[in-house]
Image: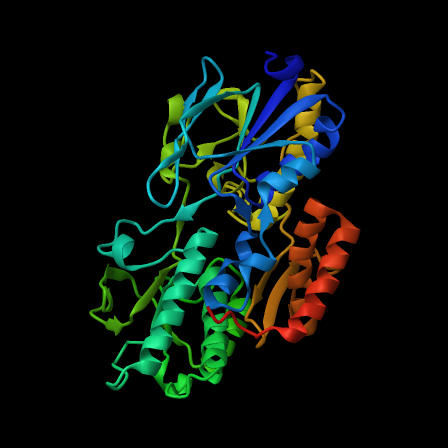
Amino acid sequence: MQSTENNLHHVVIVGGGAGGLELATKLGDSLGRKGKALVTLIDQSKTHVWKPLLHEIAAGSMNPEKHELVYLAQAHWHHFKFRLGSMDNLNRATREISIAPNYDEDGVEVIPRRTIKYDTLVIAVGSTTNDFGIKGASEYSIALDTQDQAEKFHRRLHNSLLRAQTQAAPIQQGQLDVVIVGAGATGVELSAELHNTTRELAEYGLDKIDAEHDVKISLIEAGERVLPALPDKLSASVELELKKLNVNLFTSERVTEVTDKGIFTHSGKFIPSSLVVWAAGIKAPNFLHEIDGLETNRINQLVVKRTLQTTLDDNIFAFGDCAACPMQSNAPDKAGHNVPPRAQAAHQQASLLYKTMKMRVAGKTHYPEYIYRDYGSLVNLGRYSTVGNLMGSISGGSLFIEGLVARIMYRSLYKMHLIALHGFWCTALQTLARTISRRTEARVKLH
């Protein structure tokens, strides 16, 4: 089916996360620039920030204004179209998606409801935090799924410190404490960043606050250890570092209720806290659940074949955290599982779909299958430590790394993302400019 401008094949990508934005940029630079296809990216935000950085924005160790990318500018530079909005419905018979109205902060409609036709639809809307219906979790905890949520947490943290600094009464129990539910990579990295930034903030004139005693950070995990999805050795190394930072670790503890005063666990513990971050579990956005009859699983992920086509419609693809793709991996022990929701998987899938989209536009109907390649994991504990494991070493197994080498590799992941969006030289110049400007800036965000 042909549609839209000049009868060009229309590729619509919903979701401007790392994978969706990389795919739109590559397709725009090739098919869009040469006039071989029309590429449209849809996202509910005006700007993009790499999701693995959200914990740094939340803690205040990174200023998002210096790292966010404006979708409209990227679309202009790379020959694709950007449309602001949230997909909320699908009509497979007419090959149309529905975009919900967009409102400003005062509730005034800015953009009315629209429908957009597609020839090929790629859904890459990522995931949201899964609170599993725990009482009070949605009301009294903050997730870190978006830049807005990360900034909201930082404002609350900063206001709590200012309030404690200026109040006449002594600091109360739990007033400056932070509880993080979920000891996966996000929870672990956030706890280390918070340890650093709360102490940095206290040095900037907040002399009434003794960060070592007044600010307590607690990490709650239902599993038996931190980083339960990663190798034991990596988990043990991270746990040792967190204990050095006096982060309170509660493993094998399930949260049963969240209140404005703290959390309760299944064993009867109450952990007081004025700020709760929920970083336990994921699910795909609710609107995907059996959308127009497409097959989804219990956490709303679209079930796809190894070509990343949805099982019931070959014109619709899905990848990243919102897709349940059967595992075919370089790790034999993972056979029979789905591809894990990790940034490296989304990057690999975007690269595969770039080839697939070019084949579709050329009229081909047989597409390559995705094979997940596990290159290992890296966990960054801010300025304190970085640890990780690399897969496929000379020994054929997993190689444990830490310290400077691990830190450089962790930073290189972000640089690889930037290179995919901007090219090598632009990324190099941006990096140099940020290195120079940091010398005249506060080490943490102070507002």
Q: Is residue 103 left or right of residue 258?
A: right
Q: In the displayed orientation, state which residue is furthest to the left.
A: 268
Q: Is residue 220 visible?
A: no
Picture layout, residue 306 above or below residue 365: below
Give the residue at x 75% y 47%: 423
The one of 355 and 222 positioned closer to us in this rendering: 355
The one of 239 and 69 positioned closer to us in this rendering: 69
Q: Is residue 72 left or right of residue 321?
A: right
Q: Is residue 283 visible?
A: yes
> In which quarter of the view is residue 8 placed?
top right
Residue 346 placement (x, y as % from top left): 58, 43
> In which quarter of the view is residue 99 placed?
top left
The colouring scheme, among rainbow, by chain, secondary structure or one colour, is: rainbow
Q: In the displayed orientation, state which residue is furthest to the right.
A: 425
Give the residue at x 68% y 64%: 434
Q: Is residue 277 left or right of residue 268?
A: right
> In which quarter of the view is residue 224 placed?
bottom left
Residue 273 placement (x, y as % from top left): 29, 71
Residue 82 placement (x, y as % from top left): 57, 34
- The number of callouts visible is 0
Picture layout, residue 333 above or below residue 14: below
Q: Is residue 264 left or right of residue 227?
A: left
Give the residue at x 43% y 35%: 86
Q: Quadrant of the N terminus?
A: top right
Residue 169 placement (x, y as % from top left): 23, 85
Picture layout, residue 10 above or below residue 60: above
Give the residue at x 67% y 75%: 439
